[in-house]
Image (cartoon, coloured by chain):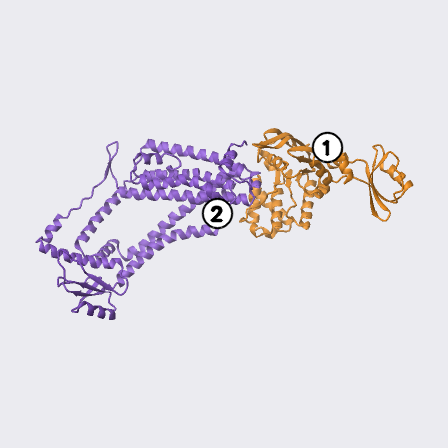
Amino acid sequence: MDALIARGVTKRYSNHIALDQVSITIPEKTIYGLLGPNGAGKTTLIRIINQIINADEGEVLVFGEKLNSRHIEMIGYLPEERGLYKKMKVGDQLLYLAQLKGLSRNDALIKIKEWLDKFNIRDWWHKKVEDLSKGMAQKVQFISTVLHEPKLIILDEPFSGFDPVNAQLITEKILELKEKGSTIIFSTHRMETVESLCDHIALINKSKKIIEGPKKQVKDQYRSNTFLVEHKGNHFTLPPQYELIKQELIEENLFTSTIKASKEIKGNQLIREMIDITEVHSFQEKIPTMADIFISLVKGEDDEALKKHLQEV
Amino acid sequence: MNKIWLIIQREFLTRVQKKSFLIATILVPLIFPAIIGGLVYIMAKEAESAKADKVQVVDESGKFSFENTKRFTFLPLDLSVDQAKKAYNETEDFALLYIPPFEISKPEGMIIYTQENPSIEKVGDLESILEERVRDLKLEEYKIDKETLKSLKTNISLKQINLSDTGEEKASSSGLLYGLGFGLGILIYMFVLIYGIQIMQGVIDEKTSKIVEVIVSSVKPFQLMLGKIIGIASVGVVQFLIWIILITVLSSSVLGYFGLKMPQKQAMEEVSKNMNQNEEMQELMTEKNSKVNDLLGNLSEIPFGKIAFIFIFYFLGGYLLYGALFAAVGSAVESIQESQQFQFPITLPLLIGYFGLFMFILRDPHGSISFWLSVIPFTSPVAMVGRIAFGVPTWELVLSMVLLIGGFILTTWIAGRIYRVGILMTGTKVSYKVLAKWFLMRE
């Protein structure tokens, strides 16, 4: 079953459209990357899923059921603009937020102890949030998001404010949650996070969804049978089914060539032919990174120009 | 509902657990009895230890023969003014009184020399002693007997009785009603303002600490706003109750303590004796005493139960009406400073009610301006409570209450619409136009 389906979701404000007929499908137990530049409409979509605002058109289904107030307890939301009550103690704060999410007081107390232990911060219970460092407060905030064991977790830029050690810790916890069966929506600009964590992605730009699908499939879509070959000497001519896009001199008589092969040709065939005509030092297929795809798509290049661009970078 | 309850609890507990709440709740009631007790104590001490001030007298007119009073000991001197002045500076006496020769019809030129600035009270006392003496001289000259004069003096005090529709007679006292109306009106004004601003501050805190987006993903913005308003109201009510209890207990124990030491009547006589030896004054005092008794009688005629109920109704109604507006302002701005421009139109009607209380309601409780002020929901909490003790026709009261309920439902609805958008907006320059846009924005 899909964790979330949005169909034709549209949100208009008086002078602009924040979301224009956006449809996405988020499979269960995946990490789903919601990408897009600032102001694209990601936050609007997330707020609609959280029922903070309502869509003007379209519908949202959560686990097959039309979005309603019962879903609030199934969703954990870590907004990008986040904070805690500064004067409240960590324990009281977590208890309050958990109860607002529908947990009973006793259940909440047990869960809070569990999570504080997981992060080794049990002695923080009586600390006021204003006495915590930013990174410490972020940990508390993360706990508050997942405390009620939501089936759908929405994390908006979850790593901002964390040092690499703690970011690693949070990553582990996120993967654990996924193992336990939660579905996680990631909204982020950090492409390395997307590359390493996400199973599915969607890209939203200028209020519209541009692309969606499993990460590998998206990347494959932009594979163009282009290869990078490092070789000695450049006194050769390529067979006609290959196109030399670019050739760079690295050091004395050592070159890197970007070679595009026509569709039916596999990498192995190119290697074979290259070995015959030159001394090959390295060989790899040029697969576009998510960052490349993101930037190109946002720049609004059409498919052909895009593929060309992706070959050249 | 359950979630609103959680919010109310949090708002209440976080405020009540603050040290500042504890301090304010305990200190304020201590201040009043402390001031009263302190004053009574000082007065009692002063009365005990007061020594008569020595006044040297150079009487060139020969018309005065001074008797010593509790306050003043008079020392007649047989010196010229200049000599006396020199001699006076050597002494530590309170004053040197110089009386030149004068016509009885024109008693002028009397001078008092002192080493320090004398209190107005003491100078006044001396003046009245002199005046009394000159008046006696005048009486003699005009051949008027003191007794005749006394019988001429008349004092009339109107006993006030309201004739109700049923022809029932009710004693009333406008002075008492004035005091009651004044006190209750101010109390509501202060409560609405102080706690309204607390609501605003709370909303701004949630917005700037950015917790609000997390909260509204769990509850509706309207629930959050309502929970906050009710939570803070309960803080206010609890604080007021504690104050009332503490003030009553402390005041009565302070008064009891001094009352035991000095029975009230005796104290009053003591004071009046000290103030003036004049017999007529004493008579006046007893007359006043009978007036006090009248007043106490009237006190029992005022329907306190009804007034208490109406006070609580307007207290809460006014608070809810303005509280929602303060919440809306808090949601639109990002700091207290920024809120000033929007606070003004909110506090304006409250101020109008406050000034209307002094200018119209307490002076003319049944005039048409008083009527409108006590019916329009924005001014009625202060105005009606100020007016209620004077007696308000039932239909006016019902109209005013219905309008107030309608009023706070309306402001809460308007405020809720602004609030739900405002709390999630940061970095926008907010104007009234923007507020209107938020208000009209669809869900």
Decide which of A210, B403 is in the foreground and name it. Answer: A210
The answer to whether residue B171 is seen in the rendering is yes
On the picture, is B228 further left or further right than B74?
right
Q: Which residue is mark 2?
A: B15
Decide which of B78, B323 is in the foreground and name it. Answer: B78
Query: Quick one: quadrant of the C terminus of chain B?
Result: top right
Residue B359 is situated, as x and y percent measured from the top left of the image, at: 32, 41
Residue A233 is situated, as x and y percent measured from the top left of the image, at: 88, 45
Q: Amino acid at mark 1?
A: Asp
Q: Residue at x 87, y 47 (%)?
A: A253
Decide which of A59, A12 is in the foreground and name it. Answer: A12
Asked if marks 1 and 2 fall on the same chain, the answer is no
Q: Quadrant of residue B133?
A: bottom left
Please tell me whether residue A295 is drawn above or below residue B24 in the rendered image: above
Q: Secondary structure at mark 2?
A: helix
Residue B92 is situated, as x and y percent measured from the top left of the image, at: 25, 68
As drawn, the residue found furthest toward the left would be B143
Which chain appears purple?
Answer: B
Q: CA distance from mark 1 to mark 2?
A: 59 Å
Q: Colour of chain A?
A: orange
Q: Which mark is residue A302?
A: 1
Please tell me whether residue B158 is drawn above or below residue B78 in the rendered image: above
Q: Which mark is residue B430?
A: none
Q: Residue at x 24, y 47 (%)?
A: B292
As drawn, the residue found furthest toward the right would be A276
The answer to whether residue B1 is seen in the rendering is no
**What's the chain of the residue with tag 1?**
A
Q: Secondary structure at mark 1?
A: loop
Residue B345 is situated, as x and y percent measured from the top left of the image, at: 43, 39
Please tell me whether residue B76 is drawn above or below residue B386 in the rendered image: below
